Amino acid sequence: MSQPRFGRMIPAMVTPFDENRELDLNKAQALAARLVDGGSDSLIINGTTGESPTVFYPQKMELFRAVVEAVGDRVPVIANVGDNCTADTVNFARDVAELGVDGFMCVVPYYNKPPQEGMYQHFRTIADAVELPIILYNIPGRCVVNMEAETTLRLAHDCGNVVAVKEASGKMDQIKAIVDGAPDDFAVYSGDDAATFDIMKLGGTGVISTIGNVSPARMKEIVDLCAAGDWEAAAAANERLMPLMTGLFETSNPILVKEALKLLGFPVGGVRLPLVDATPEQSERLAAVMREVGVLDA
């Protein structure tokens, strides 16, 4: 397999906050460097795992600028600019492009439940308005609506700068249809760590990862083994890490990802309301799983 433009293992980076739940830009830069040192191929900033709904636009700009400054010369920095208002997304993307990011991620519009043609027109409008490459993000569990394979493929073929999709639908037939029907250089990323192995067996590219915040090297090992076609070793590595892949989602993401980083001695602050921090019981169960998979010392 050739190396895709954004690589194969891309953490959706958490957004660090201080004790007052304000942006901690120094910690964001340190975390970005830590993830790159751990083998990450690119970074997604301000995604679901980055608490994008509760990070205000001026703060998003500060965050993008800080991460580009820290690691922009080492890996591609991809800014999530997606919104459920097309015009707002276009304006925001144009502003963010000035900061030196390498690409955008844009989520399927949520809450307003557009039909497939509305999704197509939404993403086509954004793609026509900017030059940077775009990763589509399909996550029906959060957006209520599913972007079907036909719509993704229309965008992949019609828009030269729509270069990838993050697929978190869990619909393997749909994902296979995208893999088979997309241009050769179109990347299909798993949006769920636990589905990465199966999606790469279908011909997928890699993962936009949650667990990559906690153990980037271990997730990188899995995708690299898959890319090399060493399925037996990849399956074994995947099985070893699976308890943590699923354990991080015992409650709403990214509550336990932030707790895991604290347990590793790299605290990044708590989450912003309406999310709430991990309970002591959740933290205890998480620590046990981290020890079980060898991420946390016994």
Image (cartoon, rainbow, N blue to C red):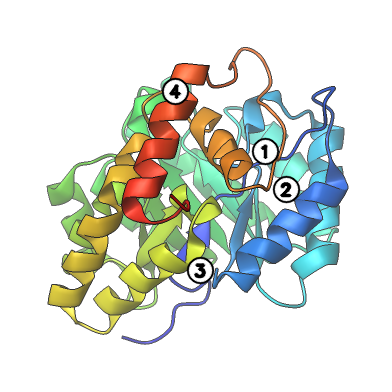
Question: In the image, residue 86 lies at what x, y percent?
Answer: 62, 34
Dot 3: within a 10 Å radius of its alpha carbon, few (fewer than 14), some, or many (20 or more) residues?
some
Task: Report how far apart the C-alphas of labels 2 and 3 lie in the structure.
Answer: 17 Å
Identify residue type, mark 3.
Gly
- Vertical side of 292 occupied by 10: above or below: below
Q: Residue at x 36, y 65 (%)?
A: 206
Image coordinates for residue 184, horizontal then vertical, percent: 32, 78
The spot of residue 295 in percent (x, y) is 44, 55
- Mark 3 touches mark 4? (CB < 8 Å): no
Marks 1 and 2, Cα distance to the nearest angstrom?
Answer: 6 Å
Q: Which residue is mark 2?
A: 93
Q: Which residue is mark 1?
A: 89
Task: State the CA–CA distance, disc 3 to disc 4.
Answer: 45 Å
Q: Under tag 2, what secondary structure?
A: helix
Identify the mark at residue 282; answer none if there is no mark.
4
Secondary structure at numbered mark 3:
loop
